[in-house]
Amino acid sequence: MPPNILWVMTDQHRYDCVGALGQHALHTPNLDALAASGVVFQRHYSTCPLCVPARSSLHTGRYAHSCGAVINGFGSPAGREASMLNADEVTVGELLAGGGYHVGHVGVNHVRTEPPLSQRGGFARFITKSDYGRYLEQRGLELPDMTPYQHPCPTAFGDETRIVRFSAPNPGVHPFDPEDYLELYFAREAVRFLEQAPANRPFALFCFFWLPHPPFVIPEPYASMYSPGEVKLPPNIMADQRGKPPVHLTHLPGQVGAGRSREEWEATWAAYFGAVTLVDEAIGRVLQALETRGDGRETLVVFHPDHGEMLGAHGYFQKMVCYEEAIHLPLIIRPPGRGQPGRRAQLTSHIDIAPTLLDYAGLPVPERMQGQSLRPAIEGEGTPSREAVFSEYNGNVWVDLFQRAVVTERYKYIWNQGGFTELYDLQSDPYELRNLSGEAAHAEAEQHHDELLRKWMAETGDFIELG
């Protein structure tokens, strides 16, 4: 029988915010244990620093501009249309269900299809935030007002500008008992799926948590678990915007992040740490249920976020930029049976996840998928050949702000709308403090990366032109 699959995703989770991978003061025992027993891909990148496009890539094995879902797109019919998968796209959940898997989804669903994925994907169980809302109603609980934890941002919807309130860095204490909070509700539903999954066929559980996405309003004891004064901030917190495109200051990351003091960022980081520890607890409950079933070692376990979080790097908050904090992510894979635990240095991308799941399931990988299975690297049989990985951004609620990035072993090159370019030597400058674009000493590297980017855009049918 093919192996079971447990696919775990967090939202807006930085690479350095898994204790075993960066912030050792951060308490993430369950992810740390998974990293110790599995394979850690150290150079994994999101295809887009935004929820809907990133998750659409993950489900289809294709870039956002290839599968059609390029923005989050709420607030208008035109925006929503640009967040939908193309009508002919097939998701990995549908392919696994068609291959005999008992498939379940528990958690955040940001993949938009018509009809909805829950109705067309062959899922045996599909639990989302709507189900959580009904749970709260049955418990007689009401969610607190989040207005104090939001920032009003002037936001373009085509030719019209509206004020939209987006989550801000302000931390707060949620009034619920942790057991009534969203993450542990999702964990219980995931455990229920595992307990009820039939023993005579393989299961695939997609367990997609919300944290550590803002607002950072979480229950005790997690809200006060970390002291702001004990947080060690990276060197690019409070860094100025020299070498950065001015457009970031008028878009959400710069608007929400502007003007905050170091002390305020320390408080934000402490709350973020609490959110990470809470979601680690939720993940641990699911992993324990897997072991209780008795087939934990016969299960392919995959963990990663959809994208990262700036948390004040260069003065920006949230994502929507192509810097390391937003697109460089933790990827941990524990294979069934044999494998070679350890760390892998090759470049990997979100488009590789779906082919990897299908490969382990013994199912064919559709030719239209643009990634490659990581199974050879996981099992120590070789490393997939790849010079570069790519990321894109096309706007948040409207298709109106374009960035394209290419990452190689040493460099990152970013093209921004209007022709503003950035080049960073990630080996000597991992915090991207010095933009090398335009410097004569790095002209050859810049030209090579520009050529890589243009070739990728042409081969994948990107809808914009660099000029």
Image (tube, rainbow, N blue to C red):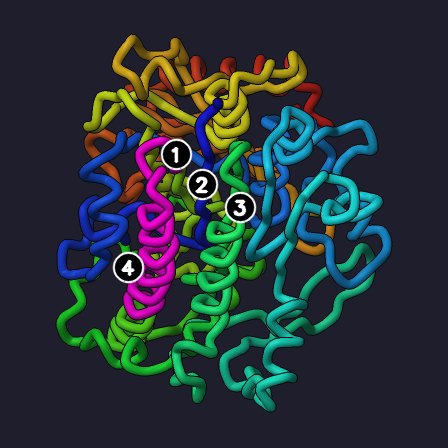
According to the picture, the residue beneath numbered tag 1 turns out to be: 299
Q: Is 106 positioned to the left or the right of 348 in the image? A: right
**Mark 3 vs 1, N-terminal side:** 3
Q: Earlier in the sequence, mark 4 or mark 2?
A: 2
Label 3 SS: loop
- Residue 403 or 203: which is nearer the viewer? 203
* In this view, the mark in front (4 or 2): 2
Circle 4 packing at 10 Å, graded few (<14), some (14-19), many (20+), is some
Residue occupying image coordinates x 39% and y 34%: 299
Where does label 2 land, which residue?
6
Disc 3 marks a residue whose amino acid type is Ala
Q: Are marks 2 and 1 in contact (CB under 8 Å)?
A: yes
Query: How much space separates mark 3 and mark 1, taking CA atoms?
Result: 13 Å
Q: Residue at x 67, y 68 (%)?
A: 130
Q: Is residue 373 visible?
A: yes
- Packing grade of label 1 (10 A; few <14, some 14-19, many >=20) is many
Q: Which residue is mark 4?
A: 237
Camera-side residue: 26 or 434? 26
Q: Amino acid at mark 1?
A: Thr
Q: Is residue 203 above or below residue 194?
A: above
Q: Residue 312, percent across and down?
A: 35, 61
- Span of residues in magenta: 272-301
Q: Which residue is mark 3?
A: 197
> Mark 3 or mark 2: which comes first in sequence?
2
Residue closest to the eye, 450 or 457: 457
- Sequence-wise, the earlier of marks 4 and 1 is 4
Q: Can you tell which quarter of the image residue 123 is in?
A: top right
Could you give the CA–CA distance between mark 4 and mark 1, rounded to whole angstroms?
39 Å
Q: In the rendered image, which quarter contains the C terminus?
A: top right
